[in-house]
């Protein structure tokens, strides 16, 4: 580590600071006792996504930082330890249950918006019914809460009124996830699943200051938009928090080489006081598109010169790289992307396309091949099939 007061960072130093803050190390092996603590404490937010082309997103950050592990152990920890809960933190995400109270202001805002807009009598009745059924019967899936065939649909995403009602109650904090079955939430009233000490809200300004502090710790070095995006705060809200944290010394203003505003002026940035500048940190990893390293696209472009857009919703003929491309990190830089799919029936990992960036290291293909072997082994796949699409050359005879 470089032990010196930091006021200026090179672009390479900023990348190392960010990756270290995100839990990447030069010794990635998981600990035998409480193996997930390092990654989860560093990330603070573990985004959940339903896409399961290769692996569900919430499994990927631990794999990216530590290699293969048993996914059920992570699920057991997230849903069974009582230490985590789900809420709209970045998007839908796991957060420490102790930090649920920091989102009370968001829950109140969402309830107020619903009240101001108004809703149909059928939806209001569904809300009352969900409350009553959960109170009487405890945690339930949506299909258990619904009565009879789903004939009446709500106006949003073709949801039934019951589904719409339970998602509103979840957003308001009245209802929580008490686990999942086939990736469908089992809903419970908050008081049925969360300890009373975590149901007391923190005032808005204090909560937002604490959220920005957590974002800063997880990012290491960041701009105001970076800090705001981590927990989806408004820029004005994050700015107030940054001023307070800077005054207290928790955030230290720094200048980062090459970080510019749209007008070309140096972009203000802040270093968390606990951040360190590793002398060397050069991890290799496959990332989920929802990893904090890349989820805020302007930061990924600024820090890694990596332009990334997910193409799931892009028509096939208009896709540039592939349906579900995973960013490829080589030596601490984003050097490519690989479109992966797990064919579980054939026990095969399908490399549908592989691409390198213009300045990718010469050994990018070798690193990618090694990571693909690790990925196949992690997913229990015995074969790797390379299509040959894309500009990154991989061995056709890759074996898992």
Image: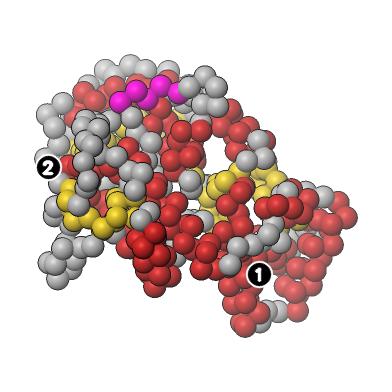
Specify whether 27 is left or right of 46: left
Q: Residue at x 80, y 69 (%)?
A: 128
For the question of whether residue 353 can be seen, the reply is no
Numbered disc 2: secondary structure: loop
- Give the labeled residue for mark 2: 358
User: Quadrant location of residue 243?
Assistant: bottom left
From the image, state whether disc 2 or disc 1 is nearer to you: 2
Specify whether 208 is left or right of 334: right
Q: How many marks?
A: 2
Q: Where is 6 relative to 372, above or below?
A: below
Q: Where is 157 relative to 80, above or below?
A: below
Residue 190 in percent (x, y) is at 73, 55
- Quote the CA–CA distance across marks 2 and 1: 48 Å
> Few, some or many C-alpha atoms within 10 Å of disc 2 (few <14, some 14-19, many ≥20)?
few
Q: Nearer the viewer, residue 246 or 399?
A: 246
Q: Earlier in the sequence, mark 2 or mark 1?
A: 1
Q: Nearer the viewer, residue 378 or 387?
A: 378
- Give the labeled residue for mark 1: 154
Q: Residue at x 58, y 67 (%)?
A: 203
Specify whether 158 is left or right of 206: right
Which SS type dominates the magenta stretch?
A: loop
Image quadrant containing the N terminus: top left
Span highlighted in magenta in the image: 26-30
Is residue 129 a member of the stretch shown in magenta? no
Specify whether 212 is left or right of 185: left
Q: Which mark is residue 49?
A: none
């Amino acid at each position: 580590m470089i032990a010196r007061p930091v006021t200026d960072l090179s672009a390479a130093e900023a990348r190392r600071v960010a990756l270290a803050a995100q839990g990447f190390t030069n010794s990635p092996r998981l600990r035998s006792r409480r193996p997930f603590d390092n990654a989860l404490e560093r990330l603070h937010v573990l985004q959940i996504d339903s896409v399961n082309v290769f692996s569900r997103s919430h499994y990927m950050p631990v794999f990216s930082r530590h290699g293969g592990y048993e996914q059920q152990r992570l699920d057991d920890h997230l849903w069974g330890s009582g230490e985590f809960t789900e809420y709209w933190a970045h998007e839908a995400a796991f957060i420490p249950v102790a930090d649920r109270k920091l989102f009370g202001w968001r829950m109140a805002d969402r309830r107020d918006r619903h009240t101001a807009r108004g809703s149909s009598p059928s939806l209001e009745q569904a809300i009352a019914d969900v409350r009553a059924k959960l109170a009487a019967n405890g945690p339930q899936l949506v299909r258990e809460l619904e009565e009879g065939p789903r004939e009446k649909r709500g106006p949003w995403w073709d949801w039934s009124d019951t589904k719409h009602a339970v998602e509103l109650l979840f957003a308001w904090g009245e209802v929580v996830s008490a686990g999942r079955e086939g990736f469908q939430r089992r809903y419970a009233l908050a008081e049925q699943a969360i300890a009373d000490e975590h149901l007391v809200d923190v005032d808005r300004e204090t909560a937002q200051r604490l959220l920005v502090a957590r974002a800063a710790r997880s990012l290491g070095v960041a701009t105001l938009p970076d800090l705001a995006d981590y927990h989806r705060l408004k820029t004005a809200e994050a700015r107030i928090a940054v001023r307070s944290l800077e005054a207290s010394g928790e955030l230290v203003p720094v200048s980062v080489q090459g970080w510019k505003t749209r007008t070309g002026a140096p972009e203000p940035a802040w270093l968390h006081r606990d951040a360190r500048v590793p002398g060397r940190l050069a991890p290799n990893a496959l990332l989920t598109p929802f990893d904090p390293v890349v989820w805020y696209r302007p930061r990924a472009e600024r820090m890694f010169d990596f332009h990334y857009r997910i193409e799931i919703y892009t028509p096939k003929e208009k896709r540039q790289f592939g349906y579900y491309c995973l960013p490829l990190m080589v030596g601490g830089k984003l050097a490519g992307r690989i479109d992966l799919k797990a064919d579980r029936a054939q026990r095969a990992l399908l490399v549908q396309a592989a691409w390198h960036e213009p300045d990718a290291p010469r050994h990018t293909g070798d690193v990618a091949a090694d990571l693909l072997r690790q990925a196949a082994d992690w997913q229990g796949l015995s074969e790797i099939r390379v299509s040959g699409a894309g500009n990154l050359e991989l061995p056709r005879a890759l074996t898992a």
